[in-house]
Amino acid sequence: MMIRTTLAAAMTAVALLATSGCAVTRKQETVGQFVDDAAITTAVKARFVDNKEVDATSIKVETLKGTVMLSGFAKNANEKSTAENLAWKVDGVKAVKNEIAVRP
């Protein structure tokens, strides 16, 4: 009986340790932050697809804690600034880092 109780207690402890925290290992974001960031990234990409001035396939979008990072290549400075402006218009965006390179 004592072995069964000890085994049950050990299994409960392992289960609690495995599920506690609810943090995603990606830079200690919570699950909620990760979902919000994914929604922001999707919304920014959708705006790029809908806009004829931005080549959505040439620009990469990543979001971490509401900060959007744009990288890739643009045909001209206008495309680069349009991409940044579109990113700023998405709900939940706290900052935009525009690392898009303009092709010569």
Image (tube, rainbow, N blue to C red):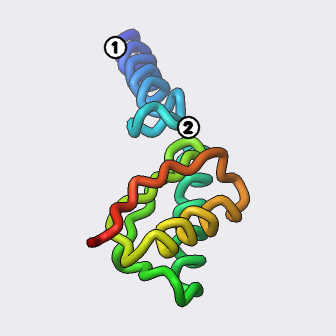
Q: Nearer the viewer, mark 2 or mark 1?
A: 2
Report which residue position mark 1 lands on: 3
Dot 1, crowdedness within 10 Å: few (<14), some or many (≥20)? few
Would you say the residues marked 2 and 1 are in contact, meaning their CB atoms lie under 8 Å apart?
Answer: no
Viewed as shown, does residue 14 lie left or right of 19?
A: left
Q: Residue furthest top?
A: 2
Q: Give me the C-alpha separation between circle 2 and circle 1.
A: 37 Å
Q: Nearer the viewer, residue 34 or 71?
A: 71
Please tell me whether residue 23 is drawn above or below residue 4 in the rendered image: below
Please tell me whether residue 71 is drawn above or below residue 25 in the rendered image: below
Q: Amino acid at mark 1?
A: Ile
Q: Residue at x 37, y 78 (%)?
A: 75
Report which residue position mark 2 lands on: 30
Viewed as shown, does residue 39 lie left or right of 26?
A: right
Q: Residue furthest bottom?
A: 52
Q: Residue at x 41, y 75 (%)?
A: 76
Secondary element at tag 1: helix
